[in-house]
Image (cartoon, helix red, strand yellow):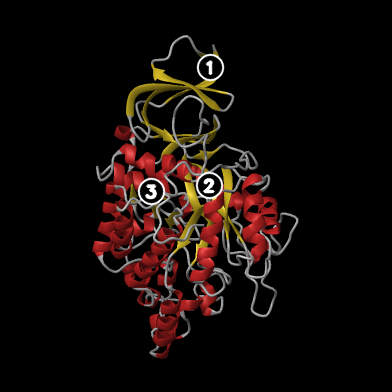
Amino acid sequence: MELDTIIRNGTVVTASDVWPCCDIGIKDGSILVVGTKLTGFKASQEIDAEGAYVTPGGIDSHVHLSQYYSPPPGQPQKTLITNGTIPAEYNFAGDDHESGTRSAVAGGTTTVISFAFQFREDDSLMPVIEEYHRLAQDKAYTDYAFHCIITNPSQTVLEKDLQTMIEVHGISSIKIYMTYQDAKLNDYEILDVMHAARKLGITTMVHAENADVVDWMTDHLEKKGMTAPYHHGTSRPPVVEAEATNRVVCLSELMDTPILLVHVSSERATDVIRQAQTKTLPVYAETCPHYLVLTADSMKKDGFEGAKFVCSPPLREESSDVQAIWQGLKNGTFTTVSSDHAATCYNHPGGKMKALGGHDHGHDHSHAHHTSRFRDIPNGLPGLETRLPLLFTLGVLTNTITPQKFVELTSSNPAKLYGLSSKGTIAPGYDADITIWHPQASFKPFKLTNDMLHHKIDYTPFEGTEMLNWPRYTLIRGQVVWRDGEIVGKKGFGKFVKRGRSSMPGPRDVWLSEWRP
């Protein structure tokens, strides 16, 4: 039988098994056969994995791309409609769908789920979704999908748009915020969203931080002159995340609806989630590599350099928080590991330098402290390309997590949680989205530098980290898009993927009172 591609001699890993000396046969973009020493097949292309690990292509389920527009004060808080081209893109300090997905394939990620952001005055989600389709169309190197961020749960959104979002656009997940003045929902609104989501089988993602505490702390820190980047973390101690996490878990229990806590950073929040899961509540959790690697000390770097490490929730001060996140990976508290790639350049007037009026004042430590406010620093770190190699290096190759757990966290669980039914594992019938690593014995470790990466961002928070392996090949639907350090895929090859409902456990039909939805 004629195949398109055969991958030979791989150590194939799924979320449950490791198969040494294994071959994979690919036909028409899908995996046709998996077995040991396949015979009777011919292929126009054969790839020798040389005994290296072969894992399902990474699915990064939390990525911010092409979010270029933030309405200034006094202007309508509505989505700007374009022809698919970002206006005056030189003013945009982040990654778009071209640069972000280009970076993704170089790090072994084959599918990204980014966000379509609804502004407060967008009464409907439809123009928002249509705009993000235009911004992504014909630009992506990877396959892609969208979550919808809801900041205005209007009657139109709840009673009409959410159903259209699923049935027409194949978008089966939403995200809500409990913080940020221009995005947060109050508890009443959160219950409205959960009520509607439950009816439709939508997965609700939640950014859990107590907005009022953050604002109060920030105002009082500024009165004391405590405005340096490091005090971003001071304004958001772990209790701020833990309280909001507990509150939204209680709301989800009341409404009997699944939720996913995004980018969990602390031991206290992790404990809340673990307790909820022990009660068999459908509560899921995501964390990110920066919470496994970095601490708040990074925000103390000289001058304004600490701004490079400002994200929310913040990097934590205590090593016990880092250890708790690793423990949560091992014991199953965390469902997924995403990048939360919400990057802005450092040396850019619209990036981290925005808090200094758009200019780098050099490395005068005291000057940077007195001319900036941490509240003005754009939040977020780059990490799309480094997500898989970091977790592979620091998790798998140190025997901290198994190869199967790596696959579960980075591919299989995201596919199940977000309804990507043809992705997330290596098995007949699934998309041939595959990452082939270097043979470990011949790989030469290197220290990471930003100029090795393929995003538009001018720094990486993981500069200098020793990498013990890196993807050698990335295949999307059977096509090689990354080979031996070179991007060989084409812009526009990536396609939008319509998703179904989550296959993770959902509502339990267990109630706290006589009320029913």
* Kind of residue at disc 3: Thr
Of badges 2 and 3, the one in the foreground is: 3
User: Which image quarter: residue 253?
Assistant: bottom left
Looking at the picture, how far across and down is residue 392, in whole percent?
34, 43
User: Which image quarter: residue 131?
Assistant: bottom right
Of badges 1 and 3, the one in the foreground is: 3
Q: Is residue 150 above or below residue 18?
A: below
Q: What's the CA distance linking mark 2 and mark 3?
A: 16 Å
Q: Is residue 412 above or below residue 206?
A: above
Which of the numbered marks, if any, corresponds to residue 344?
Answer: none
- Helix, strand or loop status at disc 1: strand
For disc 1, the neighbor class at 10 Å (few under 14, some 14 to 19, many from 20) is some
Q: What's the CA distance linking mark 1 and mark 2?
A: 29 Å
* Kind of residue at disc 2: Val
Choose the circle earlier in sequence order: 1 or 2.
1
Of badges 1 and 2, the one in the foreground is: 2
Dot 1 and dot 2 residues touching (CB under 8 Å): no
In the rendered view, does 135 fall on the left or right side of 265? right
- Helix, strand or loop status at disc 3: loop
* Kind of residue at disc 1: Ala
Which residue does the image show at 34% across and 26% down from the upper left? 51
In the rendered view, does 67 fall on the left or right side of 332? right
> Which residue carries the number 1 mark?
43
> Which residue carries the number 2 mark?
112
> Which residue carries the number 3 mark?
335
Choose the circle earlier in sequence order: 1 or 3.
1
In this view, the residue farthest toward the right is 83
Q: Quadrant of the N terminus?
A: top right
In this view, the residue farthest toward the front is 514
Looking at the picture, how far across and down is residue 389, in whole percent?
39, 45
Q: What's the CA distance linking mark 1 and mark 3?
A: 37 Å
